[in-house]
Image: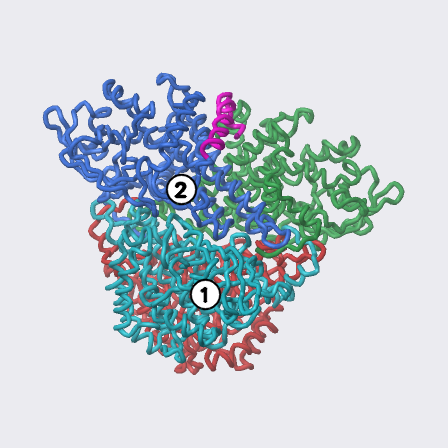
Chain colours: A red, B green, C cyan, D blue
């Protein structure tokens, strides 16, 4: 625990959660449960959820007016790191993406009746949900380009479109769909968010996309989805018409903290595996792997970089808590690429430390290597965040790159 | 084709082989055949092998006294690159590892009867083989530490041991096993190579190890194998007793060229995918991905580095052809880590260029990302080759690191 | 200012100091004062010191019982960053190395009469001092290997030895010399620190070593020094006999914070220069350099990494304040290599942003490029700190590398 | 010597040249001659030039119709590497930039009388010259933007303009000046090259720019120059009017080979220094620096990368010899950034290997560190070459970035 960010609540909660993760979840990391389909482990995790409830650790992320603990983002971030010690941590505690984001979204912006029908069972862990935004035809780095439309006909939205990377769609009770409702508005005011039950006619989960060798199902799925004349009541609109991007932005700050702290948890787990191997693998009689400078270099670099990553994220979380996300947008951009890069380096070094065993599915490392490569891509590719951050900084020096563009000046190749 | 290394034979062969690969093999790269088990595609590849034979392109690697073309290593290396444009190339042409190495080994060092029984059908593509050296209990970076033993009892070797990463063992007709036959000899003269038919009692393929999400079978398998009182005739010895390491070393030069040229082929394939995406993916109206400097940087760096890698490998091949592997051991060490590093960078950049699609199994990139991570580990971890190369260079400056060690001086941490 | 570490005192002091640095010191960064000898600018800086005194900003580093403000290390660290905005900042405020370390050393461990004679004028800025430890014949990474001896004869130490990188020796009133006084003690208890006035017979400043093109003099000098039968009173011993390393260690924590915060100040300065250039340099009609992604990438990476560096250092400082240096030795090791690496990257990117102008002495960047390369070397090469950190971490996993060495086991090359 | 590129002539010449460099030039690398002004060593080098002439090694770069040996570019490249073993090598053999380029330029494109007056004494080593192209006001990466003008008045050009980085201007007999003669032509046809004797009224060498701490003079100078109503005969035009860029382009291929092979020579020199240090520096009793894996890693990486760099450059040279520079423009772009990067890494690792001594001017390394940082900037910043290479590659995939720009489409930030 980092003294800078320790509070009375983290001091009390974290050791209990850590113990739970180590005792109940880490033993589930068998090749059987890691490879292939999530549904193989889901039933067991449901039992673990029961233990979480009994331990009074359910719903840690909820605000006080949701009958939650009202943890700050900096506090919950530290819990998120501990949960990420296991790939099953967040699921067992029902604070897994995309449900955690959808819960917050519904709580803040959905009507009471929608919430009774969907938010309550979601918070209870009785149903799951998905978030349907990315489209194969358009670059995700430019979220204003969306092909899915929702046209109002009477009391209904008629939705048509094609999505993919609708994560966890397989088995979800509903999707939150981003669709263009106001095609003639300014680019950032065209889309809205609409709740679509997955059993609505016209909602077709085409397939669970196979990702890095895993065509996983259930919560582990990343689905391609077609919406064909899907009709839902107008009251299924979340927030106001045209506010789709505003709501998506609002998700951004807390969502980024969740992601990044999960990555730090993963980094720590891999660091631990690496150090253990270094200390126990004999290379020659009495000579251990950890005596090699190459390995020592990886350990030292990892230690420094993970610590730096954690400080960056928790500082950003605390600033969001204090000043709001808008005030620290640069920090929110920076942690995305900064932490993803570090995590993937640590995973890679840990694999190299294990040699051949590192690439087998006997160990957690190969799983992270495959499943976390996406970290540099999803939620905005690193490159997008770097340019956004730089452009924002340069505004302070009098250069408005976007404005320059709007007058259609040709941009030379430096 | 690199003019420096083009010969009349490569000029004639390479376009034909490239055409075959593009027409017959690239279309097989469907998610169905890439993910999961190799046996799904094996039958189709057998048909392709028939086409290869008809085209007169079978057995390209064989020397003249094996009734082959007698291509130089530099020539065959260039062919190997073209084959590697498809993950199925080497298999279709029956010059896939580990069979290509085993063919050469048997041809040079096995008795005539062994060869009639095993080498001929192997060259004909009627059977497959495996190479059984790595052991889970010992660090692969120190090949003199081997636990498997072969004890002579009468006319038989009795073999006991535990191996893993015995690649392609599933379905193989025989294994070449490295076992200690002379435990009291100097470390490098203790082991021998023995041919073991896989249907010999006591040969137990424990499992196909799942690697990076693929528990593949058939030629794609990486097996854990137990040898329990496995008895084979003494005539199954390959080469002489105690020469196991010498033979393994002998494999090294050509084997390294094969690997490295395959990696370069993979790099070129991914480079092509990356450029295609950059040129065709629209980011905004009329603005293509390839106009972004970040992507241009990846393309430029990839181009330079792949070219450098090819020159390094073909120059080493040509030097082996002219001066023998022993004369250019440093070059053989250098290309291992130099080329593996470049390939993995190119694969990674190509994935990033594709964004979300890059991590799906819809594309070849994720497959390479997973399956080629091992390149920095197998055949000696990069770190091993770096230290070996450096130590050899330092000998020229009067420092014999190994000798220093032999007098048991403590080695400080710099 | 980083909210996490802001205090009432930093809030009051830092704006005033920043203003002073910008108004009084930055204008001095002319090629004339930067290149060549420090003595050219020293007289002017003495006038600036007078202004510092008048502004009540003299002696910021002193503890309360030295009649100072008693700033915490975390507070003074933040001031040190601001001072480092100019290469002349620390000197103008009389808290430059090595004097700042010598002041603390004398204050804590020297006799009253020594302090009256040397510490008081040092604090007043009337004299300067140097620290004489590194020897050309022995690797600095192993501080227990020292050739300089101090032999007691009657009431005097007789010192003989050869030092270099005795920084600021040219014009210094005295040197603190590390010399072996107890050759038969354990390695870490052999040396002592002795104060040697530079006008003592036998003290010979051989030369000011030319470093990266600068054979600078005065405070900017890095001298080679010979001690030939140098005789000083036994009372010139600082601390107790044999405690040289203990005292050097004690310097370590605060000294590291000083160094690292100075590097962060340098990084911020170069970052500012880089952004200014990006925003104002036209590449084509109306197209500014800052619109190029390559430059945006440098800016974004720099921003993230400098922030991370600052958090790492101030967190370490605060931990030293709270728990003592011994408790956070790993953090003290980590910041050395972590921050030095970042600073040198930022300097390099800033140079590249300026193109040809970046390598001229018209700008501060080339000066930093040359003078701060040593950051990865002095105060223990980065590699030393990495191995130290890793070994300490591995102890927690049961591997004691040093103990392993003590039984003289040969260490293989991984 | 790399067998791939060895010819009878290199086999005969290179050992002789190497011996000369080692015997006559390496001993001159004293701090006295390295730091400060080139004029201090110039007189001695003139004596060495006399030895070069006597050894029949003068003018190695000349073509047969210049009474030279007519070495191929690949052959001369290998000689250039050997010369670069010393910072004084090229000068001693009178094939230093910018004179070598000016000789070729005049030989091919200047009138007979100009050549008699300037080329002959230049080839004889009796005078020196400079090349005046870069301007402080315009980005060097866009060579069509030039402010210097040459207006024809009667039989004279009247030149006005402001240049810097006019290398070797101090003491040069003449400058080749790039000036706009045809302001209304297409951007690439506006400028011409004009020979300007430096004693022409209005030619003012403002200063020798201090670069990385060296305000060197003579051949080592990099001058700022003002041209104020400088009048020269119209016959001083080199080549045709408006062909300035064409001629500059023509210089490019051979010039790039010269630069890159010089960088490789520097890399080899630093590699040698690094290995020597590793083999001879004792860290503890009997433990040498070269036994540390960190150092071994630098040595191994350096060896591989320098070899790769040499193969890349000599292959490009051979291709220019065979197919012309236009055919391998991509290769010419690639070697610029590929080799500069490698050289600077090797220099940096060598410094780190020496520790504190590495940053002193007692050794050649600090000199290279300072003086070769410009390699990533001059002759087109690396970034320019990367984008040029990528754009050219992408044309093959159907994307014409420049064309896209010409229709003024806004280019988004990826």
Magenta-drawn stretch contains B187:
no
The front one of D331 and D2 is: D2
Q: Position of residue C293 (x, y in %)?
A: 33, 50
List the single residue furthest toward the left.
D154
Q: Nearer the viewer, mark 1 or mark 2?
A: 2
Mark 1 lies on a secondary structure that is: helix
Q: Which residues are magenta?
A: D1-25
- Residue D147 image-quadrant placement: top left
- Residue that badge 2 annotates: D32
Query: Quick one: which residue is furthest to the right in this view?
Result: B154
Estimate the x, y position of residue D128 in percent, counting from the top left.
Answer: 30, 29
Relative depth, front residue between A370 and A345: A345
Are the residues at dot 1 and dot 2 in contact (C-beta closer than 8 Å)?
no
Residue A341 vs residue A33: left or right?
left
Q: Is residue D250 above or below residue A278?
A: above
In the image, is residue D22 part of the stretch drawn in magenta? yes
Q: Residue at x 42, y 32 (%)?
A: D89
Secondary element type, mark 2: helix
Give the residue number, with chain letter if any, for mark 1.
C256
Q: Position of residue B25 (x, y in %)?
A: 54, 38
Residue C17: x and y in percent read 29, 69
Label 1 environment density (alpha carbons within 10 Å; few <14, some 14–19, many ≥20):
some
Main SS, magenta residues? helix
Residue at screen point 43% across, 73% down: C115
- Numbered circle sitting on residue B349: none
| Horizontal side, residue C21 vs residue C229: left or right | left
Residue A184: name its quadrant: bottom left
Please give the chain letter of the residue carrying mark 2. Answer: D
**What is the quadrant of residue A190 in the picture?**
bottom left
Cα separation between marks 1 and 2: 35 Å
Placement of B383 over or under C44, stated as above or below: above
């Amino acid at each position: 625990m980092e003294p800078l960010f320790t509070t009375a609540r983290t001091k009390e909660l974290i050791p209990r959660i850590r113990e739970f993760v180590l005792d109940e979840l880490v033993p589930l990391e068998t090749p059987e449960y890691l490879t292939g389909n999530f549904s193989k482990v889901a039933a067991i995790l449901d039992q673990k959820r029961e233990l979480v409830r009994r331990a009074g650790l359910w719903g840690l992320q909820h605000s006080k007016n949701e009958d939650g603990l009202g943890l700050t983002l900096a506090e919950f971030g530290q819990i998120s790191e501990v949960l990420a010690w296991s790939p099953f941590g967040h699921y067992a505690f029902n604070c897994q993406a995309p449900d955690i984001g959808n819960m917050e979204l519904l709580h803040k912006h959905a009507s009471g009746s929608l919430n009774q029908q969907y938010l309550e069972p979601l918070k209870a862990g009785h149903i799951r949900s998905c978030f349907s935004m990315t489209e194969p035809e358009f670059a995700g780095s430019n979220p204003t380009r969306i092909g899915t439309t929702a046209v109002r006909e009477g009391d209904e939205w008629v939705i048509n479109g094609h999505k993919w990377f609708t994560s966890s769609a397989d088995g979800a009770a509903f999707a939150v769909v981003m669709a263009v409702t106001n095609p003639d508005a300014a680019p950032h005011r065209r889309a809205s968010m609409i709740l679509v039950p997955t059993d609505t006619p016209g909602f077709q989960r085409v397939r669970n996309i196979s990702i890095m060798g895993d065509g996983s199902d259930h919560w582990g799925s990343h689905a391609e989805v077609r919406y064909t004349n899907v009709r839902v009541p107008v009251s299924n609109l979340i927030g106001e018409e045209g506010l789709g991007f505003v709501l998506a932005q609002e998700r951004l700050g807390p969502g980024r903290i969740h992601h990044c702290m999960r990555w730090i948890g993963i980094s720590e787990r891999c660091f631990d595996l690496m150090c253990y191997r270094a200390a126990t693998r004999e290379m020659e009689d009495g000579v251990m792997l950890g005596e090699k400078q190459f390995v020592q270099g990886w350990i030292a670099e990892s230690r420094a970089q993970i610590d730096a990553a954690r400080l960056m994220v928790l500082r950003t979380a605390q600033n969001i808590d204090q000043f709001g996300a808008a005030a620290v947008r640069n920090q929110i951009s920076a942690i995305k690429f900064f932490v993803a890069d570090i995590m993937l380096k640590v995973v890679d070094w840990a694999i190299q430390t294990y040699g051949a065993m590192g690439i087998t599915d006997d160990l957690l490392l190969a799983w992270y290597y495959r499943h976390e490569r996406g970290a540099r891509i999803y939620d905005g590719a690193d490159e997008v965040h770097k340019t956004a951050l730089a452009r924002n900084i340069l505004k302070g020096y009098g250069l408005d790159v976007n404005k320059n563009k709007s007058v259609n000046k040709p941009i030379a190749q430096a």
